Image (cartoon, rainbow, N blue to C red):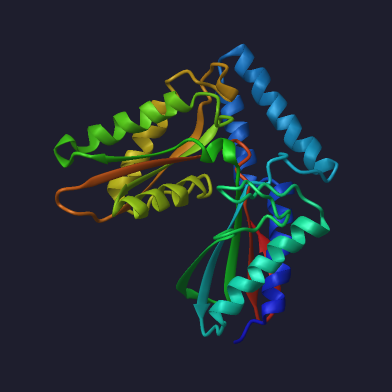
Amino acid sequence: MRIAPERIEDAARELYIRALKVLPPDIKQGFARLAERETGRTAKAVLGTMIENIAVAERTDNLLCQDTGIPIYNVTIGRGTEVDGVALKAAIRRGCARATREYPLRSSIVHPLTRKNEHTSCGIGVPVIHVDFSDSFEGMKIEMVPKGSGSENNSWLKMAVPAEGVDAIKTFVVDCVLAAGGKTCPPTIIGVGVGGTADLCVHLAKIAATRPLGSSCADAEGAELEAQLSGAVNMLGVGPQGLGGDATAFAVHVEVAATHITMNPVAVNMQCHSARRASAVLDADGIAFGF
């Protein structure tokens, strides 16, 4: 099966708009759980305002947040699927630019030195495009994540000492959550990468931060660490928007990779309360949109 670049371009355009306008069901359910458990009066009021803001945005067909983020496209190519890799990336870039110009969206992307904005949400190396492969389906899946700067600015990497063990990881994550405070627009999803090289570790943290709520680390030790950290960070009192309370995070997600015997990298990347994403599966039957 061959997927035409025109279909990929149309999907990339639509995904950017959908991700900015409709919050995934798992995040809405996460809000409901946090609001039910919250004991602080101010925190309850803040959570209520956030929930209402989401409802109003969707009811009036508006964006959930004015920050259109750094556009990230995660592409998974299934079995029996033919695609020109160069054409794939070019199509996604065109779709991203079309969404920005045709909708229109605020372009948040600038040159890192001149700060010049091309008003396309594109630039050198942006949109960020990751390509992977899977034997579990036929066709192609494209996931779009607009990553806001408020959460992205709160990213950390530590090359921990292996002898310090898991305790060093836990301490680092807690310290990062406290340092971020309300700057990440909590409640957040806290992504933690452990292992690999420095760059792989940071990438793992991003994958963890943008995973759906209710998912677990595939590694048993990583899943146990998720549970321990999720409980710990919600005892810190940061609360919604950093104004105090129980609801500091929806969850802590962990992703792991093997590493060197003399290394133990750990990275933290956070996703704000507007944890936006959208996905589409392109196959012989057409395009199916989801989250």
**Quadrant assignment for the N terminus:** bottom right
Seen as rendered, the residue at the extreme front is 114
Write the residue at 79% across / 39% down.
Answer: 57
**Residue 102 location (% of width, % of height):** 82, 59
User: In the rendered view, does 61 fall on the left or right side of 79?
Assistant: right
Taking depth in this image into account, of 254 and 163 the one nearest to the observer is 163
The one of 227 and 166 positioned closer to us in this rendering:
166
Is 81 situated above or below 89? below
Q: Residue 254 sits in which quadrant? A: top left
Counting from the top left corner in percent of width and height, residue 183 is at 55, 28
Measured as percent of width and height from the top left, residue 156 is found at: 39, 38
On screen, residue 200 versus residue 270, left or right, reads left
**Outermost right residue:** 60
Q: Position of residue 232 (x, y in %)?
A: 38, 27
The residue lying furthest to the top in this view is: 41
The residue shown at (55%, 30%) is 187
Residue drawn where x is 52% and y is 74% of the image: 77
Tell me if residue 291 comes above or below residue 209 in the rendering: below
Pick the residue in front: 154 or 172.
Answer: 154
The image shows a total of numbered marks equal to 0
Which picture quadrant has residue 197?
bottom left
